[in-house]
């Protein structure tokens, strides 16, 4: 029988070390490997190409996402950049219009210069996707839930359209992690992460990873990984293995705390709107229940004006005002001026990324302390 998630998180790719029996995978801090004769080696030649600590992390995350192989990179953006190198001039890509600002920047400011073409659509409506697909469409890209508007995309429906059209479906699963959502099982071809967020989970590293559904795609991506070389260092991979062991526990608590925070925000008279897929009032609540086993730790709230948003963010004491998300500590962010500053103002307005929008990354501190912190910050506005 297939082992459960927490068991795989702790053991997959992480057998005790052969020489001493150490229960943690050693940190192989090396750039090269000695050969006994020319071309005679143990499968490791040069550390851009192979590193045993990195390989253990890649095997671990592949087991958690239920994919063929993991391919690790030095950041979330380096992961997406390497995925983009699978395509060529003239290829068309359809992406969800609501997504991480840096993803939009990479598409619009870098890959458009290289002759790739992009369409941005409201991916919550699969008929829009059907209309946007062209004969040159090679990839469809989405997050779910989207960042920061927390819309939920029907991954299975999108995957069906992609298959019929021979386009690859790439899903950024950073917000959910494989503990809550496994896009490959819903028909995606590649799932990617900013490991910097929940998978790292302790706000102490920058990293990225992709897991492919097939060995063929993994080989293509590994070719780019080696050719372009945006690889993570062994210490970061070692930290990821350390973090993976508590992923199930952490995600359960992020989810529990965020549900409580979202319910409180939803009832509070000073908050105009609370965006969280776990609320029954969320437009895709039923879909979120169907395709994920929880709703995660990310919440966006609308406070009505930039001034109110700034006051709220600055008055919070436990929630730290910072970019990023997914760490054990709670963070607050003002998307319009921080994470989504690179999205053009008209696009921000159309998507609802208003100057009064605040994004919360709910950590795993005591729930009562987080609720009190929000209450006292709201009192100030
Ligand atoms: C942070 C983030 C990224 C970028 O990852 P880095 O590790 O910062 O390069 C991509 N997608 C999402 C959803 C993110 O939150």
Image (cartoon, rainbow, N blue to C red):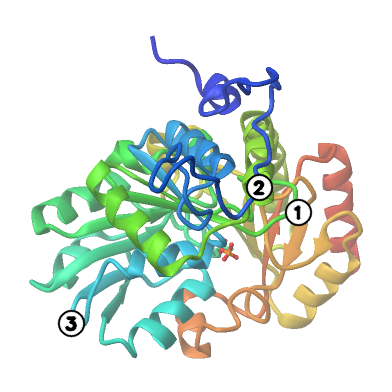
The quarter holding residue 49 reads bottom left
As drawn, the label of residue 200 is 2
Kind of element beneath mark 1: loop
Residue 361 appears left or right of 289: right
Report the Cα–Cα distance between label 3 and label 2: 36 Å
As drawn, the label of residue 204 is 1
Kind of element beneath mark 3: loop
As drawn, the label of residue 90 is 3
Q: Is mark 2 within 8 Å of ligand 1?
A: no
Is 254 situated above or below 222? above
Report the Cα–Cα distance between label 1 and label 3: 39 Å
Residue 54 appears left or right of 314: left
Q: Does the rendering let one see residue 283?
A: no
Is the Cβ of the residue at disc 2 closer than 8 Å to that at disc 1? yes
Mark 3 or 2, nearer chain start:
3
Q: Quadrant of the C terminus?
A: bottom right
């Amino acid at each position: 029988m297939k082992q459960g998630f927490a068991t795989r998180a702790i053991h997959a790719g992480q057998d005790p070390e052969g020489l001493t029996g150490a229960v943690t995978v050693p940190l192989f801090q090396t750039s090269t490997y000695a050969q006994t004769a020319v071309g005679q080696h143990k499968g490791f030649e040069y550390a851009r190409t192979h590193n045993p600590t990195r390989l253990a992390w890649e095997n671990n995350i592949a087991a958690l996402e239920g994919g063929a192989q993991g391919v690790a990179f030095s950041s979330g953006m380096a992961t997406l950049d390497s995925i983009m190198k699978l395509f060529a001039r003239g290829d068309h890509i359809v992406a969800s219009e609501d997504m991480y600002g840096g993803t939009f920047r990479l598409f619009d400011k870098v890959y458009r210069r290289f002759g790739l073409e992009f369409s941005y659509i409201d991916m919550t409506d699969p008929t829009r996707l059907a209309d946007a697909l062209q004969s040159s469409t090679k990839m469809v890209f989405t997050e779910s839930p989207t960042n920061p508007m927390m819309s939920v995309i029907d991954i299975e429906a999108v995957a069906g359209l992609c298959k019929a059209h021979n386009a690859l479906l790439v899903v950024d699963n950073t917000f959910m992690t494989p503990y809550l959502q496994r896009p490959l099982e819903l028909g995606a071809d590649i799932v990617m992460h900013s490991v910097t967020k929940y998978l790292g989970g302790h706000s102490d590293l920058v990293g990225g990873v992709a897991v492919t559904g097939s060995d063929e795609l993994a080989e293509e991506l590994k070719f780019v990984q080696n050719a372009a070389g945006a690889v993570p260092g062994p210490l970061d991979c070692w930290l990821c293995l350390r973090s993976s062991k508590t992923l199930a526990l952490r995600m359960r608590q992020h989810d529990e705390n965020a549900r409580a925070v979202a319910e409180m925000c939803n009832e509070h008279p000073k908050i105009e709107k609370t965006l969280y897929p776990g609320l029954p009032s969320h437009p895709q609540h039923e879909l979120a229940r169907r395709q994920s086993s929880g709703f995660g730790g990310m919440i966006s709230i609308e406070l009505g004006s930039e001034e109110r948003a700034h006051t709220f963010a600055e008055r919070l004491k436990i929630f730290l005002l910072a970019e990023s998300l997914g760490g054990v500590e709670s963070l607050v962010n003002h998307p319009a001026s921080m994470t989504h500053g690179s999205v053009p103002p008209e696009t921000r307005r159309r998507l609802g990324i208003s100057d009064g929008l605040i994004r919360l990354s709910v950590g795993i501190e005591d729930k009562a302390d987080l609720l009190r912190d929000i209450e006292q910050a709201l009192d100030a506005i």
